[in-house]
């Protein structure tokens, strides 16, 4: 089994991250646990946070092979995948601002605005009638979900979940069009999106079992669709419970009170951390 922990170096690791990393590490027992740095958002990623992540994970007792994969090194791979989807006529440039999308989805004839795993479902304003021609542009690029699923020709899609919601999770083409829509695959100034990068990286690293928080459960449908479109295998998924604060709110990067570094400074041990997260 090959598992991974894929933090973004945009803040301190907290108890929730510790749980995710420890679980992915423990599940790989006898296999390989990998670390991947998800730093595509260069406006928020900081080398100092990355150094702190390495330090905290080492302190927890985790080890992983070097060098680690870093998304900022993978832009050519993301571009190649976009070129492949472009050549198939499955993506198109979009010039809508967030405001445009809000206005279009608030239009009375559209009914209630619907949210998918990636935010407001795109109303299709820039979707062309026929696939765009020419070279792959440097632009915000969206997946034409209807066309992509028609190209796949699989009315039912599925992945295997081993977390608390365990079982075979199936969904239909129609469900994906209605509840996900035309998601962004290349964001402005980023050359990719989280969804495209994570799918390509998991495949490139040979991840067999993706272990991550249940907040990403709904996004997994997007990942399965991208895997099918790009001819990549679908790993097993384990979406674990989220660690919450005393008020039941999920921990966020700004919850410095539960930063691992804080517990370390208070003299807690890695064993204490395992106990706190229920491992
Ligand atoms: N980088 C994501 C995060 O820090 C995790 C992505 C994933 O595990 O698929 O939330």
Image (cartoon, grey):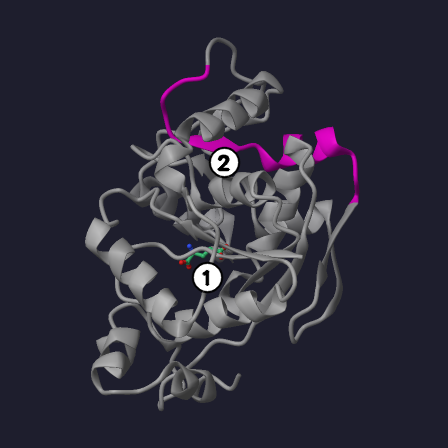
Q: Which mark is residue 63?
A: 1
Horizontal side of 166 relative to 62 (left or right) equals right
Quarter of the image with the N terminus is bottom right
Kindly tell me whether residue 104 is visible in this rendering: yes
Q: Nearer the viewer, residue 260 or 136?
A: 260
* Pointer 2 local density, CA inside 10 Å: few below 14, some 14–19, many at least 20: some
Q: Determine whether label 1 and label 2 are within 8 Å by CB.
A: no
Question: CA separation, marks 1 and 2?
Answer: 45 Å
Which residue is depicted at the point 57% across and 38% down? 204
Q: Which mark is residue 124?
A: 2
Q: Position of residue 251 (x, y in %)?
A: 35, 75
Which residue is depicted at the point 24% across and 70% down? 254
* Magenta stretch holds residue 93: no
Q: Which mark is residue 180?
A: none
Stretch in magenta: 136-155
Looking at the image, is 181 positioned above or below residue 127? below
Q: Nearer the viewer, residue 248 or 34?
A: 34
Which residue is depicted at the point 78% across and 34% down? 153
- Quadrant of ligand 1: it is bottom left
Horizontal side of 10 relative to 4 (left or right) equals left
N-terminal of the two: label 1 or label 2? 1
User: Hey, which quadrant is residue 103 in on the image?
Assistant: top left
The local secondary structure at tag 1 comes to: loop
Q: Position of residue 35 (x, y in %)?
A: 45, 54
The local secondary structure at tag 2 comes to: loop
* Magenta stretch holds residue 151: yes
């Amino acid at each position: 089994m090959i598992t991974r922990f894929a933090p973004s170096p945009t803040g301190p690791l907290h108890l929730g991250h510790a749980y995710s990393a420890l679980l992915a590490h423990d599940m790989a027992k006898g296999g390989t646990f990998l670390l991947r740095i998800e730093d595509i958002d260069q406006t928020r990623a900081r080398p100092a946070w990355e150094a702190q992540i390495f330090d905290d994970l080492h302190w927890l007792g985790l080890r992983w092979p070097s060098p680690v994969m870093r998304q900022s090194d993978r832009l050519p791979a993301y571009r190649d995948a976009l070129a492949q989807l472009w050549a198939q006529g499955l993506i198109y440039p979009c010039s809508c601002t967030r405001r445009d999308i809000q206005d279009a989805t608030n239009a009375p004839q559209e009914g209630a605005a619907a949210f998918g795993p990636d935010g407001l479902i795109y109303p299709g304003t820039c979707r062309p009638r026929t696939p765009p021609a020419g070279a792959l542009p440097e632009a915000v690029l969206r997946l034409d979900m209807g066309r992509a699923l028609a190209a796949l020709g699989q009315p039912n899609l599925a992945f295997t979940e081993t977390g608390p919601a365990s079982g075979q999770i199936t969904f239909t083409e129609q469900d994906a069009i209605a509840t996900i829509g035309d998601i962004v695959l290349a964001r402005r100034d980023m050359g990719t999106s989280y969804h495209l990068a994570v799918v390509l990286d998991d495949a490139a690293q040979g991840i067999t079992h993706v272990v991550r928080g249940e907040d990403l459960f709904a996004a997994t449908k997007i990942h399965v669709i991208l895997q099918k479109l790009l001819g990549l295998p679908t790993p097993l998924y384990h979406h674990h419970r989220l660690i919450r604060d005393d008020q039941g709110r999920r921990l966020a990067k700004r919850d410095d009170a539960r930063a691992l570094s804080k517990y370390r400074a208070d003299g807690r041990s890695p064993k204490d951390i395992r106990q706190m997260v229920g491992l």
